Image (cartoon, rainbow, N blue to C red):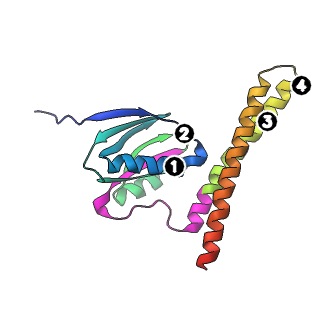
Amino acid sequence: MTEKMTERKTVRKWFWVWDFDKEERWLNQMAMQGWALAEVGWCRYVFEKCEPGAYIIRLQMHPRDESYTDFLEEIGAEYIGRVVQWIYFRREAEQGEFQLFSDTQSRLEHLQWIARMLLAIGLTNLLIGVVNAFAGNPIGAVNVVLATLLMYGLGRIHGKTEQLKRERELQE
């Protein structure tokens, strides 16, 4: 029995959590070039050779929920993997449109989920940084810088939220 070998390549790339839409566009551009996402890890993407445009790739921040994954598999999506709270799916393009968000409200809820996570981690880092600073520990500066970066990301998510709300108002 001979097993068909699939050409694969690994790309190491960093995306900020608030640039998830940029990450998704890049993954779909790779699919359009004939490289479908096959595995995902921390800053690591494994692609396998495919027909250009054969797949649509989607990602979403979502808690572990086997029923949600099962539902997406029932509609033809293939679960690729998870990195912390981010889940990745692909579906054959010939099956038609593939979206994880059905309307503006679900997109807004997704952004709120990301914002809550950024806020919680950012405030935690700020608290740790302040406590370390008062204790004379210089490592606290790292936490303060990280908190500042996460608050920047929160601002970016807020901007995306406001843009979606404006678009919704125009549609109504």
Instruction: Evaluate whether residue 139 shows in this view.
Output: yes
Is residue 92 shown in magenta? Answer: yes
Residue receiving disc 3: 126
> Residue at coordinates 69% horizontally, 48% vertically from top-left?
154
Label drawn at residue 134: 4
- Marks 2 and 1, how far apart at CA: 18 Å
Label 1 or label 4, whichever lies nearer to me, is: 1
Place of residue 16 in the rendered image (x, y in percent of width and height, measured from the top left): 58, 41
Circles 3 and 2: CB distance less than 8 Å? Answer: no
> Residue at coordinates 75% horizontally, 30% vertically from top-left?
143
Q: Residue reaching furthest bottom?
A: 172
Crowding around mark 2 (Cα neighbors within 10 Å: few <14, some 14 to 19, many 20+) is: few
In the picture provided, is 40 more to the left or to the right than 155? left
Query: Which residues are the magenta region?
Result: 86-110
Q: For the residue marked with disc 4, what is the amino acid?
A: Phe
Instruction: Evaluate whether residue 121 shows in this view.
Output: no
Residue receiving disc 2: 84
> Residue at coordinates 34% horizontally, 48% vertically from top-left?
31
In the picture provided, is 171 more to the left or to the right than 35? right
Q: Secondary structure at mark 4?
A: helix
Residue receiving disc 1: 22
- Marks 1 and 3, how far apart at CA: 27 Å
